[in-house]
Amino acid sequence: MDNLAHIGPAMTTAFLASLVEAVEALTIVLAVATVRGWRPAGLGAFAGLLVLALIVVALGPLLDRIPLHLLQLAIGILLLLFGMRWLRKAILRSAGVIPLHDEATTFAAETAELRARASPPQRGPARLAGGPRQLQGGASRRT
């Protein structure tokens, strides 16, 4: 039971960190589904999970070969660098040097841009080719 007391906080921290990442991933999937539809969002989420699984299977066993203290040092340096960058931006925002974010305006502008770039759904070979097929004389036709 003494062992569980030592690993319990580490397991709880890892679980909560993973939960935060899962919420962020779900937010991205919902944003894509709102703008582009559920099919691209679902396919993107599935492809991401597949790539993650392949990376874990391929590179997971290699982590045993890296000395733990070097891995901890590298991760600590990266966390420190990212944290210092975020702290700098927060200080500059609170001082008024960098404007505060208006998330609603940013979301509306980017949604409008993505919808303007989105083409109507294509069917048949034109979809596989990535666009409308060109006919003789330069006219395009949707199949």
Image (cartoon, grey):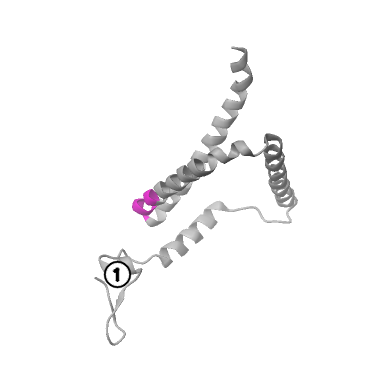
Please give the name of the residue rendered at 72% of the width and 39% of the height, measured from the top-left corner. Answer: 73
Query: Which range is magenta?
Result: 37-43
Q: Residue at x 43, y 53 (%)?
A: 32
Instruction: Look at the image and tell me whether residue 83 can be seen.
Output: yes
- Tell me: residue 143, above or below residue 105: below
Q: Which residue is mark 1?
A: 126
Q: Is residue 85 left or right of residue 39?
A: right
Point out residue 88 in the picture as x, y percentages from the top left corner: 74, 49
From the viewer's perspective, is residue 72 above or below residue 130? above
Residue occupying image coordinates x 65% and y 53%: 100
Instruction: Indicate the position of residue 110 as horizontal and vertical percent values.
Output: 50, 60
Magenta residues, dominant SS class = helix
**Vertical relation: 128 (above or below) 32:** below
Neighbours of disc 1 within 10 Å: few (<14), some (14-19), many (20+)? some
- Secondary structure under tag 1 reads helix
The answer to whether residue 23 is seen in the rendering is: no
Q: Residue 68 appears at what percent x and percent y?
A: 67, 35
- Compare residues 61 and 18 and report the one nearer the observer: 61
